[in-house]
Amino acid sequence: MYQIIDGKRISQEIKDELREKVAQLKAEGGSRCLAVIQVGADPASSVYVNNKKKACEYIGIESLSYGLREETTEEELLKLIEELNGKKEVSGILVQLPLPKHIDEEKILLAISPEKDVDGFHPVSVGNLSIGRPGFVSCTPAGVIQLLKRSGIEIEGKECVVLGRSNIVGKPMAMLLLRENGTVTVCHSRTKNLKEITGRADILVVAIGKPKFIDESYVKEGAVVIDVGIHRDANNKLCGDVDFERVAPHCTAITPVPGGVGPMTIAMLMNNCVEGV
Ligand code: NAP
């Protein structure tokens, strides 16, 4: 029988711990404040932004909300970030992605002060992670590490395979597993003999953005499988990059979609807001 890794329960556990920490911080006269910037009114982005604001409210983090119109210029957005960088009371700045096409995303992310980079996307944060210095870590992969640790799954010495090499999931995931003393292999679209490599994994993290791509032929008997993907299938039901029904019976532990990695991203964002660099 396989263990279902319960991201809903674990993310709630983390949020409750953070709520206590913030209460303590406030009792000592401290505070935390997250500035959330959204440009335009993309409905999916609005849902994410609202969920982040709700999580802040639950934990006791103040949130400043900047809903900017679609036509906002790059200069205007840069000016706002500059202002927020300089505000002592703002501890974190988050720019909801994607941005409208006329704004250079990279330029915007670079403008956020690394001390307030709660998404962990700034090159300084990425560099700190890669050389083992303290710093903000990208929230989704940080959430995967918490899922493993809080489910009693040892990483040290394990053969870990990360499927996907994006800057926000695959690459930081590999660095974090390495930091936990896993033996890490990263696969991508040019990888040859993919099944041979994934089939060696004790821990397989899948982030390729292809619905139900991974079936049992990619997975070693007894592996732990973490599914980062989120999609809607033909029946409009949420599913991941892993074909759960086919893969789960071959695992010792697996994350479901929904209720696995998904809820961890916001929990780890809140963790970044509370803990700081
Ligand atoms: P991405 O930027 O599209 O990256 C996908 C990666 O998968 C790339 O490195 C690509 O290789 C690789 N890939 C694509 N097809 C492949 C194949 N057939 N064989 C081997 N590798 C292949 O995606 P992402 O942003 O990392 O996101 C991945 C998934 O996670 C998506 O479903 C996304 O919605 C989800 N996601 C979830 C959360 C959450 O909170 N749960 C957060 C972020 C993302 P190349 O580099 O060679 O192109």
Image: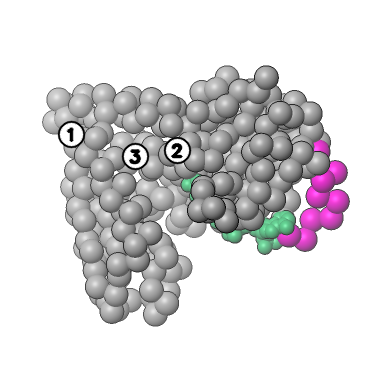
Q: Nearer the viewer, mark 3 or mark 1?
A: 3
Residue lying at 38% horizontally and 74% vertically, measured from the top left:
100
Q: Secondary structure at mark 2?
A: helix
Q: Where is mark 1, residue-wise?
A: 30
Give the residue type at disc 1.
Gly
Residue 217 point in image, percent of width and height: 81, 41
Residue lying at 43% horizontally and 69% vertically, measured from the top left:
105
Q: Where is mark 2, residue-wise?
A: 264
Q: Which residues are magenta?
A: 189-199
Q: Is residue 201 left or right of residue 83?
A: right
- Whether the residue carrying mark 2 lies under 8 Å from ligand 1 is answered with yes
Q: Is residue 32 left or right of residue 147?
A: left
What is the CA distance from the residue labelled 3 to the residue labelled 1? 16 Å
Q: Are marks 1 and 2 in contact (CB under 8 Å)?
A: no
In this view, the residue in front, 189 or 47, is 47
Crowding at label 2, few (<14), some or many (≥20) Cα neighbours within 10 Å?
many
Q: Secondary structure at mark 3?
A: helix
Give the residue type at disc 2.
Met
